[in-house]
């Protein structure tokens, strides 16, 4: 019975702490029409301390969404436009010789901010991507012989266009795995499209003012870590991830030839973290199977290696995830 009381108390705490979510969402909706899933995903990555990769054709408000979110939170924001001639020093910083002091001084790069927008990340060569990799994983940067910690919260939000294969360097699996979520953005609906036209013809964009501070985000993250996950839910997460590695154990023999490698343990960790944040956004103190299903696609999409056979048959990782979710037993 003690557990039931705990959850009730937790629900009250979460109700209080998650009030700013409504403010952020309404602030985003003033600027962005539709794209509810995108807004939720950005909030999940913010609350779970994970990085996010957005993929979609040009013009679907990916950059705008990230910029608006950073304006709604009173924090440092920097944008890096990735190009083929970008160097690691342009991202993390470098040593500059000072003639006045006759020594080298550290000049920090744009990665030293709370929110880093890595725009068109797949346009930069591998050495730049790996420089960002250390920053994302270790949350620290080495310039010369000194190591600097990055500010808290630190969040990399990257965008990429799938269709423009001209002059792009595909992200290596190791780097893609560092992103907690990979969100694929689709076109708006017909009604939303009409609203977009109407809003843009008015001319001026609505002014965005900060509605929440960095301290509140850090506090909210601590509350998210208290969201209750039952053992049955843990089992459900493990089953879903294991089904990507050994589909035959779950009666999915037809998937075995389509998958070259399954999801890593990072997938299980991020699935649990994202589900917690999703429950928090829904003002709930416990995780239900629906939360897992809601975040499963974004967490697993980029972590399943497709075989040549899958590519030849035009099978996407989304279809594989759908098959797994429909087959694995729900607690």
Image (cartoon, rainbow, N blue to C red):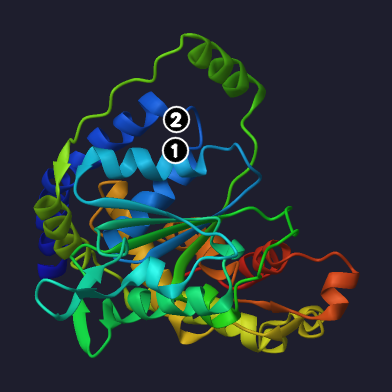
Please tell me whether mark 2 sits on a helix, a strand or a loop.
loop
- Give the residue displayed 60% in from the left and 64% down from the top: 84
Residue 5 visible to the viewer: yes
Q: Foreground residue, 24 or 10?
A: 24
- Give the residue displayed 75% in from the left and 58% down from the top: 166
Report x, y in % for residue 269.
Answer: 39, 78
How far is disc 1 from disc 2 in space, using C-alphas?
Answer: 8 Å
Q: Which residue is mark 1?
A: 64
> What is the crowding at mark 1: few (fewer than 14 residues within 10 Å), some, or many (at least 20)?
some
Would residue 326 appear left or right of 300 to someone viewing this image?
right
* Rendering quarter of residue 241: bottom right
The reply to whether discs 1 and 2 touch (Cβ–Cβ < 8 Å) is: yes
Would residue 288 appear left or right of 11 to someone viewing this image?
right
Report x, y in % for residue 4.
Answer: 16, 62
Q: Foreground residue, 305 or 253?
A: 305
> What is the crowding at mark 2: few (fewer than 14 residues within 10 Å), some, or many (at least 20)?
many
């Amino acid at each position: 019975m003690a557990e039931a009381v705990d959850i009730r108390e937790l629900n009250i705490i979460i109700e209080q702490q998650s009030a700013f979510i409504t403010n952020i969402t309404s602030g985003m909706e003033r600027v962005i029409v539709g794209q509810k899933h995108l807004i939720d995903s950005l909030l999940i990555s913010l609350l779970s301390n994970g990085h996010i990769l957005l993929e979609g054709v040009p013009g679907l408000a990916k950059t705008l969404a990230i910029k608006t979110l950073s304006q709604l939170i009173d924090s440092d924001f920097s944008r890096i436009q990735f190009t083929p001639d970008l160097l690691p020093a342009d991202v993390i910083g470098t040593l500059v010789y000072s003639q006045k002091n006759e020594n080298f001084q550290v000049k920090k790069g744009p990665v030293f901010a709370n929110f880093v927008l890595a725009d068109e990340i797949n346009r930069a060569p591998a050495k730049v991507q790996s420089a960002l990799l250390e920053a994302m994983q270790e949350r620290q940067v080495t310039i010369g012989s000194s190591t600097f910690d990055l500010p808290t919260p630190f969040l990399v939000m990257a965008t990429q266009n799938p269709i423009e294969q001209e002059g792009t360097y595909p992200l290596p699996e190791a780097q893609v795995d560092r992103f907690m979520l990979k969100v694929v953005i689709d076109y708006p609906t017909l009604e939303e499209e009409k609203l977009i036209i109407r809003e843009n013809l008015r001319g001026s964009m609505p002014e965005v003012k900060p509605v929440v501070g960095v301290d509140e985000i850090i506090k909210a993250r601590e509350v998210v870590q208290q969201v209750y996950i039952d053992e049955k839910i843990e089992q459900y997460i493990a089953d879903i991830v294991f089904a990507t590695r050994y589909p035959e154990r779950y009666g999915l023999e037809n998937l075995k030839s389509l998958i070259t490698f399954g999801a890593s343990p990072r997938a299980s960790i991020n699935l649990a973290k994202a589900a917690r944040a999703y429950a928090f956004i829904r003002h709930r103190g416990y995780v239900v199977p629906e939360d897992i299903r809601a975040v499963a696609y974004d967490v697993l999409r980029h972590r399943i290696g497709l075989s040549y056979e899958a590519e030849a048959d035009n099978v996407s990782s989304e279809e594989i995830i759908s098959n797994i979710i429909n087959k694995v037993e729900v607690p």
